Image (tube, rainbow, N blue to C red):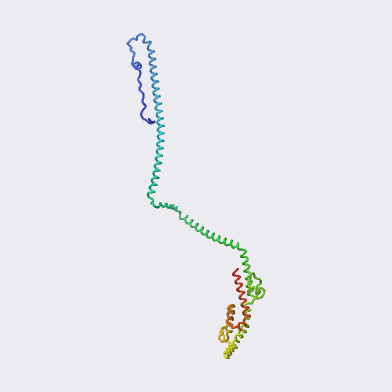
Amino acid sequence: MTDHDPSPDPVPNFTLPAAASAGSTVEPEADRPEPIGTAAAEPARTRRLSLGLIGVIAFLLLAGGEAWLFRTIARNDDSTALAAQSARIAEVDQRVDRLESRMAALEDKVDHLKAAPAAQPAPAAVPQAPAAPSVPPELAKEITAMQASIAALSTTTLADHAAMADLQSKAADLPKLADQAKTMARLAQASLALQNGDPLGPLANAPDALMRYATARPPTIGALKASFPAYARKAERAGGEVTAHGGFWRNVKGHIESLVTIRHDHDVLVGSRAAGALGKAQTDLDDDDLGGAVAALKELPSPAKAAMAPWTRQADHLLAARAALATMAGQS
């Protein structure tokens, strides 16, 4: 029986004792004369009747209390049993849920194994990149501008870093660079002295072509130009005497060529071989081509070449000194 049982509690039926019933229905007879001793027995009967009623009432009270106590105990027992039964049902439901979850996981594994190829494991699923959140247009423009600024700053930083690394490497080589600068300055002074015809002075690791003019004055292109005509006349006369040992007509031809020389500018149309080479050398000198003039003089006959030897030697020494300075400058 539960707390909400609508059925009323059973009311015990009690039967009045016979004496009480009989006493309640006995009415005194007014006309009947009371026997002797009845008046004396009436108080005793009344007391007995009262005691009986009191007993009946007490019994009824005890029976009702016992019924109420029994009902309360029954209700408490039913509530405790119902709570325990509900707890057991909840525990069973939880176990059933766990079993269903495990069964679902096992079914998924079985389906996965059935779907996978037998010879090759299934490839791992490629995770998809999450969709990029939408950016407002104005904010997107600002982000683009910031990215461009960062890229430009990165480029500038890299360039500055490269320049700093270059400066650091050069700073490490600063003593060497200082020595190179001193050497180049000294070579520049020597080149100027060579051009002006002044002594070159001492040079470290200088070749003989420069040591020759450490204290002596070197020839200049101007001095060589000025002295060339005198040497050329001597060479031309020496070249005209080459044919003196030939036959008569050869001697006549040589004598005429030595006396008459026809030129077109510096090209010799009629004249000796020496005149032609000397004319070519003169043209090169006019153009400040000292090397070309020396090369042209190599075509002279031997007597003419011997006459030009002092001039040619000075020109060769000047050319050698120039070449030595250029070589030292390139190695510094």
Say left or right for 210 vs 100.
right
Q: Where does residue 106 sit, x and y in percent of width and height? A: 39, 45
Say left or right for 181 vs 136.
right
Where 249 falls versus 95 (above or below)?
below
Q: Where does residue 241 sit, x and y in percent of width and height? A: 60, 87
Quarter-wise, where is residue 162 in the image?
A: bottom right
Count of marks placed on residues = 0
Say left or right for 5 vs 315.
left
Q: Residue furthest right?
A: 215
Rendered-image quadrant of the N terminus: top left
Between residue 90 and residue 235, name the one nearer to us: 235
Q: Residue furthest bottom?
A: 248
Q: Where does residue 206 sit, x and y in percent of width and height? A: 63, 71
Quarter-wise, where is residue 268 in the image?
A: bottom right
Between residue 106 and residue 275, name the one nearer to us: 106
Q: Where does residue 236 sit, x and y in percent of width and height? A: 60, 85
Where 310 falls versus 132 (above or below)?
below
